[in-house]
Image (tube, grey):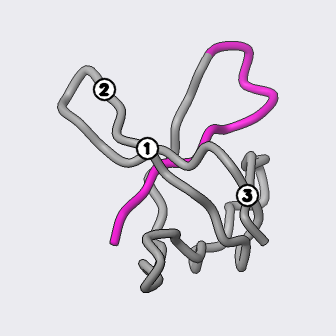
Amino acid sequence: MTIYLELLDEGVPCWRPVEAEQLPDGSFRIVDKPPEDECWAFKPGDIVQCKESQFENGRGLVAYQRVK
């Protein structure tokens, strides 16, 4: 499933679509790895909570809190 992670150190709000595994409790485990030139708000393997957010091109799930 695709979720969105905030990119850090960009100067403006930026979001990266990444692959994540949805867990039975509704949280998500990040399975993608960032490119070497990006700093993500969460790391691969982190389990995060997501909330729906509106983007210019539609809606998506944004990771906002690490669970584990």
| Magenta part of the chain | 1-12
| Residue at x 25%, y 20% (from the top left corner) | 56
| Residue at x 58%, y 76% (from the top left corner) | 29
| Residue at x 59%, y 72% (from the top left corner) | 30
Amino acid beneath label 3: Arg
Mark 1 burial class by Cα count in 10 Å: few <14, some 14-19, many 20+: few
Nearest to the eye among marks 2 and 1: give it.
1
Label 2 vs 3, first from the N-terminus: 2
**Quarter of the image where the C terminus is located:** bottom right
Question: In this rendering, does residue 62 appear at all?
Answer: yes
The total of numbered circles placed on residues is 3
Mark 1 to mark 3 CA distance (whole Å)? 12 Å
Helix, strand or loop under label 2: strand
Helix, strand or loop under label 3: strand
Residue 47: x and y in percent read 66, 71
Mark 2 to mark 3 CA distance (whole Å)? 22 Å
Amino acid beneath label 1: Lys
Residue 44: x and y in percent read 71, 73
Residue picked out by circle 2: 55
Helix, strand or loop under label 1: strand
Mark 2 to mark 1 CA distance (whole Å)? 13 Å
Residue picked out by circle 3: 66
- 40 lies above or below 53: below
Residue picked out by circle 1: 51
Seen as rendered, the residue at the extreme left is: 58
Seen as rendered, the residue at the extreme bottom is: 24
Residue 60: x and y in percent read 30, 44
